[in-house]
Image (cartoon, rainbow, N blue to C red):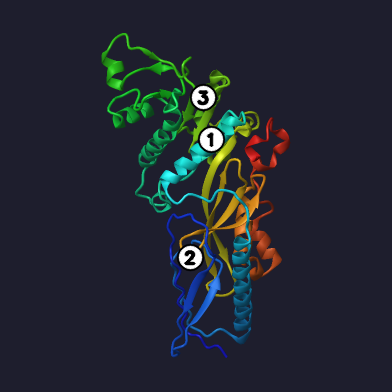
Amino acid sequence: GRKAQHHVIRIMNLGFCSSVGSSALRVRRARTGASQREQILVPGGQLRRCRLEMQESPSETEAKVEDAADVKADETASKVSENVGNDTNEDEPPPSTFYQAVTQAQEATEKALEKGFRLLEVEFPPLPQSMLDSAAIGTYTVVDANYKLVLDYAKRWADQGKRVAIAFPDAAEKDRALENSNEQEEPYPNIRLSTLQDGFKGTFLDRLLTSGVEQDLSVRDDDDMFVVMSASCQELPQVEKLCIKAGERPVIFFNLKLDTLRGDLGLPAFPPKDLQYRFLSSILPVYYLRQRSYSKTVPQPPYVVNYSGALYRAFPGKYQVLLDTSDGKFTRVETREERPALGEVRDVMTKAMGLEAVTPAPLMGFLRKGATSRTWWEVDSDKEESNIWRT
């Protein structure tokens, strides 16, 4: 029989990386009074370090259940590796550096503009995931990182002779950017700093101490395209007005986390849900990389499994569901033509991990998962004026 008295589960925390590789996590179990060590392959994920100590030996029944789960995990790991190895999809792999992310976003935007799309979404982490998860990182740190990325992004078209306006939510946000740009309204040739609404040029002190300050229009006749950044849910109506004033000129929504903003629509003091139906539904995700982390309880050690992955898309490619692996890589586990719901992404990752087979009972699985895995904006497709955001 298996008389394990002490289980130590070592689970490594992965960083931000993104090349395609095999899916495996080595979980080593050290047994008291025995020199033998057992290695079990479990499909990978961003499993954080944890420690589990058991004071009593598991019964023979628990041992049989655990052995069956181990065999299933080995089979699932093999299937995931086979699927990745046989995948002939030519979709672009996710980025491994921020420079590569910006370059891929530029290429995807160019291809969408060539096909006539005007409202475009670009979304990827502006900082390493470890920094974004840290409580020590403030909002301004994220905003400053996004500003540097959006400048590099906009240079692609500025170097082509096109005028690019970077639109901030208000004058205060623009003033912070001016401080980082040596008080220059144009931090780079053909790139100007602007706001969602008409205002005045210069810093706050210039506007306070100088009379006859020149007006700063949110939309000028010589602007060729607009990049919106740092806007909140309350400012989405102003973003919509900017898009109307821009006419047929492209507007890019840069790292606005539109999925998060959609979740606030309809709440007290926030814009109504109708904003999604008439406006946000017409925005095409041309470059999208969103990382997600999940937990799953299982009826045998380690009892709680944490895993993570990402939903990735570079236009005109398909949506890719990626799973983090123990070797610091992303493994593609599924591709889809249409944008999957966030709950469906979680389900795909759970299935790839082989965790569906170890759910204790259908009722418990229903209670953990809930009645639906879709949000209201993912369900209300019949109310939308456009389905571009799903393509």
Q: Amino acid at mark 1?
A: Thr
Which of these two is toward me, 104 or 197?
104
Which of these two is toward me, 216 or 260?
216
Q: Residues within 10 Å of mark 3 (few under 14, many from 20)?
A: some
Q: What residue do we see at 60% from left, 72% from top? A: 73
Q: Residues within 10 Å of mark 2 (few under 14, many from 20)?
A: many
Q: Earlier in the sequence, mark 1 or mark 3?
A: 1
Label 3 secondary element: helix
Q: Earlier in the sequence, mark 2 or mark 1?
A: 1
Would you say 317 lies left or right of 122 here?
right
Q: Which residue is mark 1?
A: 109
Label 3 near label 2: C-beta < 8 Å? no
Q: Earlier in the sequence, mark 2 or mark 3?
A: 3
Would you say 5 lies left or right of 78 here?
left
In the image, residue 83 lies at what x, y percent?
63, 62
Q: Is residue 54 visible?
A: yes
Q: What residue do we see at 48% from left, 44% from top? A: 124
Which of these two is toward me, 140 or 71?
71
> Looking at the image, is 29 positioned above or below residue 46?
below
Label 2 vs label 1, nearer the camera: 1
> Looking at the image, is 232 positioned above or below residue 338?
above
Q: Which residue is mark 2?
A: 326
Label 1 secondary element: helix
Q: Amino acid at mark 3?
A: Gln
Position of the N terminus, as image quadrant, is bottom right
Label 2 vs label 3, nearer the camera: 2
Q: Residues within 10 Å of mark 1 (few under 14, many from 20)?
A: many
Q: Which mark is residue 238?
A: 3
Label 3 near label 1: C-beta < 8 Å? no
